[in-house]
Amino acid sequence: MRVTFVEEESLRAGKLDIESASDRSGGSDQMHDAGSSPSGTGSAAVVSQAPVDRNVPVPPAAPVAPAATSRPAPSRAASAEAVRRTPSPSPQRPAQPSRPATAPLQPVLEIDGRKYGINADSIVLGRSADADILVEDTGVSRRHLEIITRGSTVMAVDLGSTNGIYVNDRKVDGSTVLRHGDRITMGRVAMVFRMLPARDTPGQGGAS
């Protein structure tokens, strides 16, 4: 719509004429008097609407994503209970080295640097050829000393010799229990009693 205002000097104040022109024929202007307006109020109003194409498809509305539900935060009491229920890892102890098996101990008499293993319950020492350990000394009786083993106990017994027996320089009256490292003397012969691993000792009555 196009509205044109025309000013006339000859006209006096108090009256205003409005002319309206609507272009409906592709460029030609048509003039209409204000009195012929459809409204009858002296004003012109032309409303043009573009035709609506009902065959145009309406795009579907975009889907609305569901709102994420938030989980309530665990309370302090629940967190403390979970910590108490969680088992703590037990400390690992270092593996202990395996100890080598110890050989059983065997009583041994060491005479002049030679070792005689005592493997029988009774061993006799003296000048006799029948003695288990022959001791050639004039101060030694034919059957002078007996070594008796009872389990882990070893005893020295005087067999009624002329000169007797001494253990650690003390004369033995009858018998005495021997301990590792004891020094035994009969006549002029001295010997040492020891408890040694069985693998390091000779056989009965044998010397090494």
Image (tube, rainbow, N blue to C red):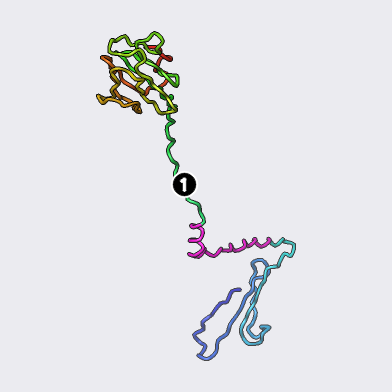
Disc 1 element: loop
Residue 4, horizontal then vertical, whole percent = 56, 77
Q: Which residues are magenta?
A: 59-84
Residue 190, horizontal then vertical, whole percent = 28, 17
Residue 13, horizontal then vertical, whole percent = 50, 90
| Above-or-below relation of 62 to 91 | below
Q: Is residue 14 left or right of residue 113?
A: right
The amino acid marked with disc number 1 is: Ser
Q: Nearer the viewer, residue 15 or 95?
A: 95
Give the quadrant of residue 174: top left
Q: Residues within 10 Å of mark 1 (few under 14, many from 20)?
A: few
Q: Is residue 109 left or right of residue 44?
A: left
Q: Nearer the viewer, residue 58 or 169?
A: 169
Q: Nearer the viewer, residue 189 or 35?
A: 189
Q: Is residue 11 magenta?
A: no
Q: Quadrant of the N terminus?
A: bottom right
Q: Quadrant of the C terminus?
A: top left
Taken as a whole, is the magenta stretch helix, strand or loop?
loop
| Above-or-below relation of 178 to 26 | above
Task: Please give the count of numbered marks on the rendered protein.
Answer: 1
Give the quadrant of residue 111: top left
For disc 1, the marked residue is 90
Q: Residue at x 64, y 71 (%)?
A: 23
Q: Residue at x 68, y 61 (%)?
A: 60
Q: Nearer the viewer, residue 201 or 56?
A: 201
Q: Is residue 34 left or right of residue 194?
A: right
Q: Is residue 163 left or right of residue 206?
A: left
Residue 16, horizontal then vertical, whole percent = 55, 86
Q: Is residue 74 magenta?
A: yes
